[in-house]
Amino acid sequence: MLNKSTTNLDAFYHYYPQNTAAVGATLNGKVNLMAVAWSTPLSFEPPMYGVAISEKRFTFHLLKRSGEFSVNFLSCDKLDIMHAFGRISGKEVDKIAKLNLRLKQGSKTKTPILEDAYAALECLLMDTQDYGDHTLFVGKVVAAHYDDRCFDQEGIIRIEEIDPILYLGNNHYATSRRDSRKIKPKEVQL
């Protein structure tokens, strides 16, 4: 089936699609959220979750200094917000005010979560490891929040109720719907 090879790995997007998440961090009253496609559960016991973030990102520094973060999952109807999280620097713009976001205080951390998320995790930073141009932040999940309409009794997401945002690479997205097509979000005007 494989019929093509390349050494130009800059154009290699075949590890996508990935579920996107908005990673939140706060320090000294400054709250920021950024979009990530490189995130993953790492352990059931204890519950651990990892996010890979470049040192170039403002959230990187907030997270590293605060020692905690949130992971927020949004449905496709919030695609423009998720896309803006990845396109606007929180160092220069207050994304919370600019995007008119509603936050909820975390129950176990100082880092807020998004009220419009269908699921969110609060994490305490347990470890960091540099891998190339990104750092893997490993957090122990200390609280989970979710909209119970979006999950069945076994905790499995109800795809018929919620369309997770899947990142395809190069600023293109899709959903889990079978009839999903490549979606290009609207750019936020500053």
Image: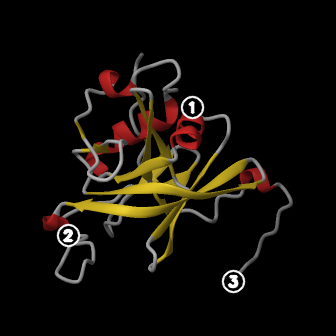
> Marks 2 and 3: which is nearer the front?
2
Q: Are marks 1 and 2 in contact (CB under 8 Å)?
A: no
Q: Does 177 sit left or right of 50 as displayed?
A: left
Q: Confirm whether residue 116 shows in the render.
A: yes
Label 3 secondary element:
loop
Question: Residue 7 occupies which quadrant of the picture?
Answer: bottom right
Residue 101, horizontal then vertical, whole percent: 26, 32
Locate the N terminus by quadrant.
Answer: bottom right
**Vertically, is 135 above or below 31?**
below
Q: Report x, y in % for residue 85.
A: 44, 36
Q: Nearer the viewer, residue 131 or 85?
A: 131
Residue underneath mark 1: 58
Mark number, residue 160: 2
Mark with earlier residue (3, 1): 3
Q: Relative to 139, is 70 on the left or the right? A: left
Q: Say which quarter of the image contains residue 142.
A: bottom left
Pinpoint residue 94: horizontal percent, then vertical percent.
40, 21
Of residue 149 and residue 142, the one placed in the foreground of this image is: 142
Distance of label 2 from label 3 (alpha carbons):
32 Å
Label 2, residues with CA under 10 Å away: few <14, some 14-19, many ≥20? few
